[in-house]
Image: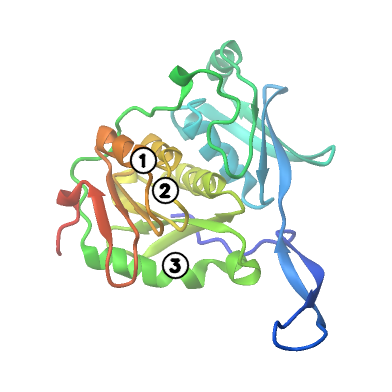
Amino acid sequence: MPPSSGAAAGTSVPAATRVIAYAEPGDRAGTRPLAVEMPVNLVYGSVPYAVMMTTPADLVDFAYGFSLTEGLVEDAGEIRGAAIEPGEGGLRLLVDLAPGRLREHLARKRALSGRTGCGVCGIDDLKDIPRAEPRAAAGVRVAPAALARALDALGDLQVLNQETRAVHAAAWAGLDGAIGAVREDVGRHNALDKLIGALMRAGTPPDQGFLVITSRCSFEMVEKAARYGAAVLVAISAPTSLAVERARLHGLTLAAIARHDTVTVFTGRDRLAPA
């Protein structure tokens, strides 16, 4: 199991501020850490594929997770490695695919200009909206108490968010609710891709735990979870209608509006069984 991530060097920068109190005259000087956001160009076989706005931490994990959830690879073995190098105004993430997979990729390459708030940028036809193949493990069972345990622990593990209050998190918890890995990013999609990449690199079986995300649960988040093969996705915020529709299609348990005392189940209630 990959370790939980702490805030990495270079993921925040100090900014000078002036704080104004509405009921008091004048203001006061201060500083506040800001989450770093920068363009990262994913490059496959020397051919640029996507520019994503992301936090410059856990980028090798990001390369693996993004490659899987974009449908460029089926498993970690189809990636021979990833390297990071400086680029003009950002970073370049060089992903080395296995030769056969690279040929397939180059044959169907599409351009994508990624943004932290958009999951289908660059798609120009409705038929190209991502849809994962159903892979959820049918035998997974998670007790509601395990969901509560994971939610209780997650806040203390969001190191960068504690510092900046500006990033999302995605976490992997074992079936007992113990959190084994956390990844953070300014983009909710990126945080989940980083986490999935970390799990891929560690060889973590998707039927041995569940995913927790701190962000809004849109259909892209469900698609990424399904692509990894997770059976249960827990979200802090509410899902969209398409997220629920896709979760049902993929046989994924979707629990959202997750609080410390309650959770609302939208699909797959049968997996959430008391211990």
At x 38%, y 29%, the residue is 132
Task: Determine if residue 63 is in view.
Answer: yes
Hey, what amino acid is under mark 1?
Ala
Left or right of 223, for residue 114? right
Dividing the picture into quarters, in which one does residue 262 lie? bottom left
Left or right of 261, for residue 5? right
At x 61%, y 67%, the residue is 165
Hey, what amino acid is under mark 3?
Leu
At x 28%, y 34%, the residue is 250
The residues tagged by marks 1 and 3 sit, at their Cα atoms, a distance apart of 23 Å
Q: Residue furthest top?
A: 107
Tell me residue 52's x, y (percent).
66, 38
Tell me residue 116's x, y (percent).
61, 44
Disc 1 vs disc 2: Cβ atoms closer than 8 Å? Answer: yes
The residues tagged by marks 3 and 2 sit, at their Cα atoms, a distance apart of 17 Å
Residue carrying label 1: 243
Hey, what amino acid is under mark 2?
Cys
SS category of the residue bearing label 3: helix
Task: From this view, report whether residue 132 is shown above or below residue 176.
Answer: above
Task: From this view, report whether residue 123 is shown above or below residue 33.
Answer: above
Q: Residue furthest bottom?
A: 24
Residue carrying label 2: 217
Quadrant placement of the C terminus? bottom left
